[in-house]
Amino acid sequence: MSETGARGRVERPHEDVHAREHGARARCLPEPWMCDVFHLDGSLRDIRVLDTTRGEWIAVLDRLRAVADETEVEHPYPQLDPAHPFFTDLFHAWADDPEGEATTFSFRARFGAVWFAALPCFEEEIEFSVWPEDVLDGAGVAAVLRFLVEIATTSQRRALLTGETVQYCPEMPTLISHDPVTGLTSHI
């Protein structure tokens, strides 16, 4: 059953279609229209979680490392493990160490055929980019939904799928969002 909410969004509880394979968090059932939000228009799609803390970033990255099909980390800090640094140490080197200023690190996670990439700029906002050309069909959309649910559930905050570089505000479109408190996914 679905409800129409504010701004004409349709809200639906996820069906638990991947629970046996991926645990109760992966409640992802793509619908045919969802492929339309990944049309090739020259821009990436961003997945954002707003008003976050360093602890939430670390929890999300740890969770993704545990559940993704594959992850990669790149960083310029010689004192840390080159491939599998502890995220607490990575954030310390990036944000707290004066020598880490003006440097950054990247994290990538693959779900199915879809890669999600983060290049942290601010602790206050978790942001991952996804390339629309990776989301070709229902399996790609399912990977995006699974990723969205994972980061929303881990951070306990609403996760938003938007167009590239759209800072969320009521006037700008959020294509799909997941609220971990209600378990509802909304879309335009």
Image: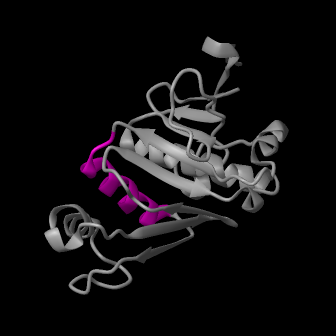
Q: Main secondary structure of the magenta part?
A: helix
The chosen color scheme is: one colour
The x and y percentages for residue 81 are 29, 84
144 on left or right of 24:
right
Location of residue 25 in the rendering, given as x and y in whole percent from the top left corner: 51, 45
User: In this image, 166 relative to 33: left or right?
Assistant: left
Q: Nearer the viewer, residue 62 or 7?
A: 7
Q: Is residue 116 visible?
A: yes
The residue lying at 20 percent from left, 85 percent from top is 79
Kindly identify the residue that appears in the image at 49 percent across and 24 percent down: 182
Which residues are drawn in magenta? 52-67
In the rendered image, which quarter contains the N terminus?
A: top right
**Up/down of 133 relative to 168, above or below:** below
> Is residue 105 depicted above or below 62 in this figure?
below
Q: Is residue 59 magenta?
A: yes
Given residues 147 and 97, the one toward you in this image is 97
Q: Is residue 180 above or below residue 46?
A: above
Snapshot quadrant of residue 64: bottom left
The question of residue 42 being in magenta is answered with: no
Residue extending farthest front: 102
Q: Would you identify the image quadrant in which residue 12 lies?
A: top right
* Rendered residue at 22%/61% (across/down): 95
Query: Residue 48 versus residue 103: which sits nearer the camera?
Result: 103
User: On the rendered structure, is 9 left or right of 24?
Assistant: right
Q: Is residue 4 visible?
A: no
